[in-house]
Image (tube, coloured by chain):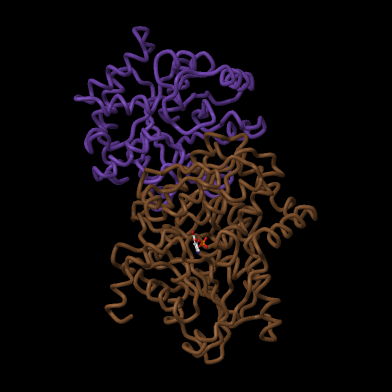
C-alpha cells in the first residue's frame, strides 16, 4: 500500500487535499509549504507541475503556473524538492500535471522518478482512459503509483464505473462543469449530482474538487464524499502572503476549524 | 494509403487527449459527425450553401505571367474569391449545419488572423445563433479590420490575455469556455487541429477544394493530377483541403509551407515541422514547438494565421512519412512574394498565402510541371502590414 491507500484505509471522512503549484510563489517554497500543510492538518497534497498551457485551469492556477515557470521551475527541480520534503514528512503527495510534460520527460523515467521522490499518485487530466489502458496502465501500476481519474456532472453512469475501476486511491469528482477556480457556493443541481454518485457504491473513495474554497463548501462536500480538494483559494492565500508557512497554517485552520480530525 | 483510424490517429499522430470535462461533447461529435455528414439532406444543404452563399466552385486560374516567370504551368486555386475572403468558410458552413443537427444554441470559435472568426460570425448570423470568438489580444491589434467585421456581424470578440496572446492562447480560452458550457455549445475549430474528430471533420469539409481542382484541371489541362500542390500551413486546413483527394496519388508532390518568421533559428519562428517535436497540443498528439521540459514555446510570424506552435496531426504524419515536403518562408520572403503577385497577376494575397507563393522560389520542379498554389485568402485584412513595409521593399528594389 502506498501512502494514499494507507490514508484512506485509516480515514474515510473529512479528507482535506490541498493543491498548490510547485515553485510558487517562490522557487524554493515548495518544501516549506508541504511541511506547513502537513503540520497544519492537511490530509493529502496535490502538487501541481506548472505548465505553459493548463487547459483545465482557471486564471488563478494559470497565473501561478506562469510565475513558477518564470521562477525557473522544472520537473527535475520538482522531484528534488519533493524528495527533500519526503525526508521530513509522510503526508501523501499526488502530482497533478498535463500529459505532454510526462511524454517529454519520458513516461517510464517520469514514473520511476516519481517513486524515487516519494510521490504516491498522479492526476493527469488530459490523459484519457483509452490511452491510459492502451499504453500506460501497466507501467504506472508496476511503479506502485496511484492514479485518479475525473468524473463530471456529465459523466454517464457506465463511464463513472469505468473510471472507478481504473482509478487507484480515490476518484476525483469535479464539482461542476467548469475549469478550476473559486466560485461562490454550491448549487442544488450540484448536490443532486453528489447524491447520485454517492449512491453508486463505488469501490474508491471520492474527493470533490473545483470550486471548493472555504470551510462552508468543504464541510458541505464532506457530507457527500470522503473529502474535498482546494486549489485556487489556497493559491490566492499564498499570493497575498508575506510568510507562506504561516499562510498555509492559517488557511488549513480556517478550513478545518477547531475540530481537527486525526 | 493515408487513413485515419477510429480513434483519430494518422499513424502515430492524432487521438483525443482531452480532460474528462470535454469528454461528453467530443464523444457526441465523434459518434455523430460521419453519420450526419453522410445524410443526403445534410449533403444537399451543405452543397447548396457552398454554391449560392459562398460562391463555389472557386475558379482554377492559369496564372500566365507567373507561369512565364517561373517556367512552369502555375494554376491558382482561388479560395480568396470565397465569401468572406478565404477558405475558412468552407469549414464553418459545414460545422454550423452540424451544430444545428446537434441542437446547439451557442457557438464559440478561436481565431488568429480573424478570417476564421469572420467566417464563424458570418455563418452564425446566417443561422441566427449566438457567436463568441476568442482572439489573442496581440492579434486583435494587428487584425483590426477583421475585429470590426466580426462585431458588425453580431459576434462578441473576447480577448485572450494569457500567454503570448495569439492563436494558441485564443484556442486555450475557447476550450476553457467549452468546459464551462458543456450543454448547449458547439466549438467550431478553425483548422485541422484539436482532438479527434476535429482534424478529420475539418479536412473533410475543406476537401471540396481538391475535389474541384480535380475536375477543373481535367477540363483545363486534360489531366486530373497536377505535379505539385503548394499550400501554406498554420494549423493546416487549407493545405488539407487542397491535398485531400491527392493524398493517395503518389505522383502528386505535396508541399506544406510554414512561416519561418525572422528565420528558422532566430528564436522568432513558427516553422513547426523543423523546430517541433512530438507532443500534445490542444488535445492532439502531433508535432509542436516546445522546450525539453514540455512547455509550449511561443511562436512568431508576421502572419497571424500562421502564428501557431503546432500543426495538425495529418500534416505531422505526411511530413514524418515523407509524403509531404515542408518549406519554410521568412516574413520578408512572404512580403516580397505578396508584392510580386500583386504586380504580376493583380491579386493581393493574404500574408498567410504569400508564404505559399514565396515557396515557388524554393522548391524544385521541371519545366512544364503543373503546379497548383492554393490561394487561401485575400490580402484586404493585411493591407496595413503591406503598406507599412512597402517603402522598405521599394528602396531595396525588391
Ligand atoms: C488566408 C489564410 N490562409 C491560411 C491560414 C492558415 O490556416 P490553415 O493552415 O488552417 O489553412 C489562415 C488562417 O487564418 C488564413 O486566414
Please name the residue shown 50% across and 41% down the image: B156
Closer to the camera in the image, B369 or A218:
B369
Residue A225 visible in image: yes
Residue B160 shown left or right of residue A194 in the figure: left
Residue B199 shown left or right of residue A148 in the figure: right
Seen as rendered, the residue at the extreme left is: A242
User: Which shade of the palette goes to chain A?
Assistant: purple
Residue B61, percent across and down?
A: 60, 78
- Is B14 rendered above or below residue B370? above
Residue A138 visible in image: no
Give the chain coloured brown: B
- Is B82 rendered above or below residue A61? below
Residue A235, percent across and down?
A: 33, 28
Residue B177, percent across and down?
A: 51, 38
Residue A147 shown left or right of residue A92 in the figure: right
Task: Assign the N terminus of chain B to one quadrant of the image.
Answer: bottom right
Residue B72, percent across and down?
A: 53, 88
Amino acid at each position: 500500500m502506498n501512502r494514499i491507500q494507507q490514508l484512506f484505509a485509516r480515514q474515510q471522512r473529512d479528507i482535506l487535499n490541498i493543491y498548490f503549484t510547485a515553485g510558487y510563489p517562490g522557487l524554493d517554497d515548495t518544501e516549506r509549504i508541504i511541511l506547513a500543510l502537513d503540520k497544519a492538518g492537511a490530509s493529502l497534497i496535490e502538487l501541481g507541475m506548472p505548465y505553459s498551457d493548463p487547459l483545465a485551469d482557471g486564471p488563478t492556477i494559470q497565473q501561478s503556473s506562469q510565475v513558477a515557470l518564470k521562477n525557473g521551475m522544472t520537473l527535475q527541480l520538482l522531484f528534488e524538492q519533493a524528495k527533500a520534503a519526503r525526508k521530513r514528512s509522510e503526508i501523501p503527495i499526488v502530482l497533478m500535471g498535463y500529459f505532454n510534460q510526462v511524454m517529454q520527460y519520458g513516461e517510464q523515467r517520469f514514473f520511476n522518478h516519481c517513486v524515487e521522490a516519494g510521490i504516491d499518485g498522479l492526476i493527469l487530466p488530459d490523459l484519457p482512459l483509452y490511452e491510459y489502458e492502451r499504453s500506460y496502465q501497466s507501467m504506472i501500476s508496476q511503479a506502485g503509483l496511484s492514479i485518479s481519474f475525473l468524473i463530471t456532472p456529465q459523466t454517464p453512469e457506465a463511464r463513472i464505473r469505468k473510471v472507478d475501476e481504473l482509478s487507484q486511491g480515490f476518484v476525483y469528482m469535479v464539482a461542476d462543469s467548469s475549469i478550476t477556480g473559486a466560485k461562490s457556493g454550491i448549487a442544488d443541481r450540484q448536490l443532486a449530482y453528489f447524491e447520485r454518485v454517492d449512491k453508486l457504491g463505488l469501490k474508491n473513495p471520492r474527493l470533490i474538487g473545483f470550486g471548493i474554497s472555504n470551510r462552508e463548501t468543504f464541510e458541505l462536500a464532506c457530507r457527500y464524499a470522503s473529502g474535498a480538494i482546494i486549489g485556487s483559494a489556497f493559491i490566492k492565500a499564498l499570493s497575498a502572503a508575506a510568510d507562506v508557512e504561516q499562510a498555509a497554517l492559517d488557511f488549513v485552520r480556517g478550513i478545518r476549524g477547531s475540530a481537527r480530525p486525526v | 494509403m493515408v487513413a485515419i483510424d477510429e480513434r483519430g490517429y494518422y499513424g502515430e499522430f492524432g487521438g483525443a487527449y482531452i480532460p474528462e470535462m470535454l469528454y461528453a461533447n467530443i464523444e457526441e461529435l465523434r459518434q455523430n459527425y460521419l453519420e450526419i455528414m453522410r445524410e443526403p439532406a445534410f449533403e444537399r444543404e451543405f452543397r447548396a450553401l457552398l454554391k449560392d452563399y459562398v460562391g463555389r466552385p472557386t475558379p482554377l486560374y492559369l496564372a500566365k505571367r507567373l507561369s512565364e516567370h517561373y517556367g512552369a504551368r502555375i494554376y491558382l486555386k482561388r479560395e480568396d474569391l470565397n465569401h468572406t475572403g478565404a477558405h475558412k468558410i468552407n469549414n464553418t458552413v459545414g460545422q454550423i449545419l452540424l451544430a444545428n443537427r446537434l441542437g446547439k444554441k451557442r457557438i464559440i470559435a478561436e481565431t488568429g488572423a480573424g478570417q476564421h472568426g469572420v467566417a464563424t460570425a458570418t455563418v452564425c448570423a446566417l443561422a441566427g445563433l449566438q457567436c463568441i470568438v476568442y482572439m489573442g489580444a496581440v492579434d486583435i491589434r494587428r487584425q483590426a479590420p477583421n475585429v470590426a467585421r466580426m462585431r458588425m456581424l453580431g459576434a462578441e470578440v473576447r480577448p485572450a490575455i494569457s500567454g503570448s496572446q495569439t492563436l494558441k492562447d485564443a484556442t486555450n480560452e475557447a476550450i476553457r469556455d467549452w468546459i464551462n458550457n458543456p450543454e448547449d455549445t458547439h466549438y467550431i475549430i478553425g483548422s485541422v487541429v484539436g482532438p479527434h474528430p476535429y482534424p478529420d471533420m475539418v479536412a473533410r469539409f475543406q476537401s471540396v477544394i481538391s475535389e474541384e481542382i480535380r475536375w477543373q484541371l481535367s477540363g483545363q489541362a486534360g489531366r486530373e493530377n497536377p505535379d505539385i500542390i503548394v499550400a501554406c500551413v498554420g494549423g493546416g486546413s487549407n493545405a488539407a483541403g487542397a491535398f485531400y483527394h491527392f493524398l493517395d496519388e503518389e505522383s502528386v508532390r505535396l508541399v506544406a509551407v510554414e512561416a519561418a518568421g525572422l528565420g528558422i533559428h532566430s528564436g522568432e519562428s513558427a516553422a513547426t515541422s523543423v523546430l517541433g517535436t512530438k507532443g500534445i497540443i490542444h488535445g492532439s498528439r502531433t508535432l509542436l514547438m516546445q522546450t525539453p521540459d514540455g512547455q509550449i514555446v511561443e511562436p512568431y510570424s508576421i502572419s497571424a494565421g500562421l502564428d501557431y506552435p503546432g500543426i495538425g496531426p495529418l500534416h505531422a504524419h505526411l511530413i514524418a512519412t515523407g509524403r509531404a515536403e515542408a518549406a519554410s518562408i521568412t516574413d520578408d520572403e512572404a512580403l516580397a512574394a505578396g508584392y510580386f503577385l500583386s504586380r504580376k497577376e493583380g491579386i493581393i494575397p493574404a500574408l498567410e498565402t504569400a508564404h505559399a507563393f514565396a515557396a515557388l522560389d524554393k522548391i524544385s520542379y521541371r519545366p512544364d510541371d503543373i503546379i497548383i498554389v492554393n490561394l487561401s485568402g485575400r490580402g484586404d485584412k493585411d493591407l496595413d502590414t503591406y503598406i507599412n513595409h512597402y517603402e522598405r521593399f521599394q528602396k531595396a528594389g525588391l
